[in-house]
Image (spheres, helix red, strand yellow):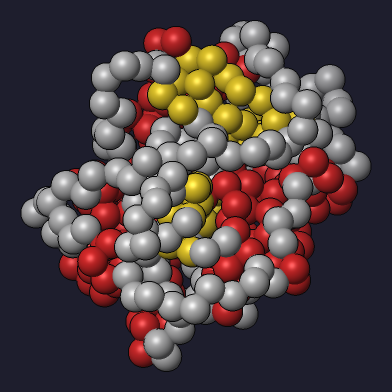
Amino acid sequence: MSDLYRSALGARLAKLPADIPSNDDVEEEESGDSLSSLPGSGLGPPAMPSIHRRKIKVKKDPNPAFAPILAKNFFVQAVQIALPSRNLDCRAYYTPSLEAHGTVMVCQHGAGYSGLSFACMAKEITDMTGGECGVLAIDARRHGKTVSTSDQPDEDLSIDVLVNDFVEVIHTVYPNPQASPSLILVGHSMGGSIVTRACTMLLDEKYKIGGVVVLDVVEGSAIEALPHMNSLLNARPDGFDSVEEAVEWHVTTKTIRNSTSARISIPAIISPSDSSSPNVPPFIWRTPLRSTAPYWQSWFAGLSNKFLGVRTARLLVLAGTDRLDKELMIGQMQGKFQMVVVPGTGHMLHEDDPTRLAEIMVDFWRRNERAVVGIKKVGES
């Protein structure tokens, strides 16, 4: 998170511009979303409707170098998973394991992103393992193409809600824990908190959990960064004139340092504004991050303790030598988890260098999932 904050400030100073049914294609036309309300909160930035900050600019033609890339070459299928008990129709991207008793890495994205942020990494993982490892990447509530089926407001992104959504996806896709493949739970930023908490619940239900992987989030740094989130969000444009411009902005500002990954993932996190007002950009953020402010504290508080307490192998992957909080520092000295730092990447490290991330994940799987029975797994106390 600290790296993301620094990147945002840099962009600001540089004044850079602003049953599971299958679908026919992994990507189809986006449906238009309306502008969300921006409630205030004692946590994070106050409500600041962004349309008043929009500047009139000359519209430029979309740059074909940043045209969207369909995800069908990176996952076997896109599925909509009906979760009636959660009032959700959940989007997931899935490449099953080719082995009868293989492993599936279940991935949960960070705030504002989608399951497609794992697309390039997922393809690398399945290629490196010859299909023995599958990947299931999930769009969280109010993110990507997951939609509410309730006629009531669907604003709650508190950690308990997100964890229960995640667990219900596992229940639906793998209803029998004994017949389920072994699962490695992977979460980026907010998603790291979700999978860490979900792990204990799934283990209690006798699912086979081969490990938990948390990508670029440390509780101490995350909590310290929350008061500065206003500056981070002010560095983001209100919207874009085209999908290509949205991709270009993410690449130019180094929010994502891999243009191929950005061309796959970014189209899913914006949507047509359906507004004729010149003050509203043609494309806006699908998940306005200001609207998530009331939930930030709940996402990260207690994460270190819960991560160290899960009864499986643990891996923490960081984009830089981020300062570990006291609990993690002690845990690392005691050998309670494996930590890997990936230089040359930013907060979106799994998009920036998907090959290196896949290598780390596959190595973690090989050393733990295939460990001889009776020998303690890496990172397991």
Q: Looking at the image, can residue 189 be seen?
A: no
Q: Quadrant of residue 184?
A: top right
301 or 380, which lies in front? 301
Q: Please count the marks in the image.
A: 0
Q: What residue occupies the far left of the structure in this picture?
A: 42
Q: What residue occupies the far bottom of the structure in this picture?
A: 14
Quarter of the rendering occupied by the N terminus: bottom left
- Image coordinates of residue 321 in percent, x first then y, are 47, 77
Asked whether, in this view, residue 276 is left or right of residue 222, the answer is: right
Q: Write the residue at 44% across / 44% down.
A: 274
117 or 252, which lies in front? 252
Q: Write the residue at 59% across / 75% down.
A: 60
Question: Vertical placement of 188 versus 199: above or below?
Answer: below
Q: Write the residue at 86% across / 37% down.
A: 131
- Image coordinates of residue 43 in percent, x first then y, are 15, 55
238 or 290, which lies in front? 238
Asked whether, in this view, residue 206 is left or right of residue 359, the answer is: left
Question: Vertical placement of 280 versus 228: above or below?
Answer: above
- Image coordinates of residue 329 in percent, x first then y, are 37, 65
Q: What residue occupies the far right of the structure in this picture?
A: 130
Q: Write the residue at 37% across / 33% down.
A: 162
Q: Quadrant of residue 233?
A: bottom left
Q: Looking at the image, can residue 57 be seen?
A: yes
- Image coordinates of residue 167 in percent, x first then y, are 47, 24
159 or 89, which lies in front? 89
Question: Vertical placement of 24 versus 186: above or below?
Answer: above
